[in-house]
Image: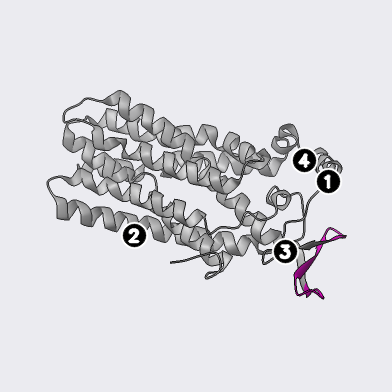
Amino acid sequence: MFTRHTITDKVAFALVAFFLGELGDGLNIFQGIYLVALGWNEGSVGIALSMMGFTALLTQTIAGDIIDKTTFDRRKFLAMAALMTAFSASAILFVQEGNVDHALMYVTKIIEGVSSSFIGPCVAALTLASFGPDSFDEVMASNILWGHVGSIVSAVLAGLTAWITYPNIRYCFLVIGFSALLAVVGVKLLPEGDVLMGRGLKENSTKVAIHSGEDGDDYANMEVQGTTSWSSTQGNIASPKCTSNSVAAEENAISSYWEIFSDRKTVVLCFTGFFFHFANANVLLVLGELMG
């Protein structure tokens, strides 16, 4: 059994990214095929499966802002988002045969879109908080890689499950639930990191030097932005405490929404992602309907 003491933080993030990748888009292409087989028409399938992506598009910025400003443990946020995504994606198990239960699919797809919007910002914030800006790109690239690997494995497992349980192919969607449970277990392996650094309010990683005291206890000399504090760790290095004044000063340095969206590069990036989503995101869904 993996524990925080047996694997590195980078491996822990890779494992969580893998299981989150298995959540994928709720196996949307399989859901499209399944709904057509139940008797849904192409228009209803298209609306249902597009609900998640469109909702996520609208709520992604809000979700990122909430994760950035929250004082709640982001690991718990990530676990809840994974479970909500899995439960809403699994609602298709309750759709009856025929062109019915549209409301069930529409509502749960909206919930799935909202909850999945929190996963990316949570992973990014935890990665930045744990590794700092110097190693952020490397670790996030690893996270994304293992997330894609998880998506492939999820599709393979769903296909095998459908083949084994045929004609009860709906059981392939149980892969989503198991993936979410494994992701929640994996979240326990993640460090919380430096909360302020996770918000991008610190430019350098926390430097920690371990010393041994006369009485045998370990002490950590922590240097954070030029300040030094000593604390007894008793086996665990304590996180540096920031005073309310320093936090307030950092809060005042945060850019406003107006400043962000006034930046030309930000606007270009947003529009590029917006049009890429509509040009590419639903190709697999259309293919799934044709196969169904």
To which residue does mark 1 refer?
243
Relative to 144, residue 290 above or below: above
User: Along the polypeptide, which appears first: circle 3 or circle 1?
Assistant: 3
Amino acid at pointer 4:
Ile
**Amino acid type, label 3:** Thr
Q: Does the magenta stretch include residue 287?
A: no
Location of mark 3 (residue): 233
- Mark yes or no: residue 90 visible: yes
Any mark on residue 153, and which? Answer: 2
> Which residues fall within the magenta stretch?
211-229
Q: What residue type is labelled 1?
A: Thr
Q: Which quarter of the picture shows residue 282?
A: top left
Q: Where in the figure is residue 188, as x and y percent of width and height?
A: 52, 55
Precedes in sequence: disc 4 or disc 3: 3
The mark closer to the camera, 1 or 2, is 1
Task: Using the numbered discs, state the Cα–Cα distance from disc 2 to disc 3 in whole angstroms.
Answer: 41 Å
- Mark 3–mark 1 Cα distance, whole angstroms, equals 20 Å
Q: Which of marks 4 and 3 is in front?
A: 3
